[in-house]
Image (tube, rainbow, N blue to C red):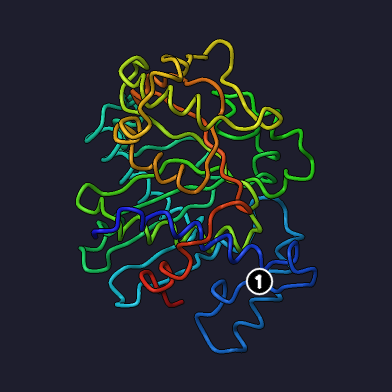
Amino acid sequence: MANRRRPVVALRSAVKRLRQAPKWRGRKLGPPKWVTARGPVARFRRGRREAAAAATLPVGQHRYERPVVLQSADGRFEIRITRDPSDIDEAQELRYRVFYEQMDAVPSDEIRGTRRDADAFDSICDHILVRDMTRDPGDRVVGTYRMLRYDVAQSHGGFYSADEYDLSPILNKAEDQRGLCELGRSSVHVDYRNNATIQLLWRGLAQYFAANETTRMIGCASFAGTDPAVHALPLSYLYHFHLAPESVRVQALPERFASMNLMAKKDIDPRQALRQMPPLIKAYLRLGATLGDGAVIDHQFHTTDIFITVEMATVPQKYHAHFEREAALRA
């Protein structure tokens, strides 16, 4: 598509949905219709009761034990919000192909043997899968994300990114904790790296964020390679122009800290810096993302990581109507 900004509008749409939730409207709101609207009205009403009951279940047992399924308007693509083990296995297979076969990640013996990118967080996270239903069964997953909510993270040892960053400036803000959601393991099939696939992934995220009243999205994004100096211009641009406010600014752990301040602010050409920025990071910036201080070298995945925060209530709204036209889905 000609419009390079289209991928960012899906998360902007989430803000519109969130502002209609109880926190902003001051009155009770049932679960969004997409959660259970695959059948008649009676099924939807039953789904509302089940969603309310799910709030009392132990952590990790909630509505996504039964996958939520959305379809593109033409029926070709399917979005699944899921915790089903078979779905997770398919996501891990795609991640293996992307990270270990097409990029420079270094697999352990176990990962090489199973040909799956897997870790202990997969079983506690929710996952989004985009499937192309015209492909052969077993090879339909073309995009995936995984999400880790605050309450689940706190009951299972914390967030994935805590291995790289001190998250206490965010976690200590009690009023924001329950709205935290960590994103990770974003992967797109090599033949589907286009705006349309990203729109589908982020439409799934918008639905997920609305259902869970997400107020802040956090997670790591990456530059290719393990030498920050190669990315001196974009890293320095991020440091000088996009650091989070000090009160909520996380910092790379001391033993893993690599400075992002590699160039003087006066020497930075913002346009050139943005041209050198990975597309996903540019998309997050358009959403109003702010950065933690310090990069982290990830030798397993052969990347230089940065920490990103997006405050959902401050995401610009100018793409809402455009997104609804371009990425209409049916449940």
- Which quadrant of the structure image shows residue 74? bottom left
**Residue 277 visible at all:** yes
Q: Is residue 94 above or below residue 26?
A: above
Nearer to me, 179 or 121: 179
Q: Quadrant of the N terminus?
A: bottom left
How far across and how far down the image is residue 159, in percent? 60, 35
Give the number of callouts: 1
Which residue shows up at 44% across the image and 63% down it? 80
Which residue shows up at 39% across the image and 51% down it? 144
Nearer to me, 208 or 53: 208
Q: Is residue 103 above or below residue 47?
A: above
How far across and how far down the image is residue 106, in percent? 31, 24
Which residue shows up at 72% across the image and 73% down it? 29
Q: Is residue 158 above or below residue 175?
A: above
Mark 1, other Cα within 10 Å: few <14 / some 14–19 / many ≥20: some
- Which quadrant of the structure image shows residue 243? top right
- Furthest residue to the front? 266
Give the residue at mark 1.
31
Q: Is residue 34 left or right of residue 237?
A: right
**Residue 108 visible at all:** no
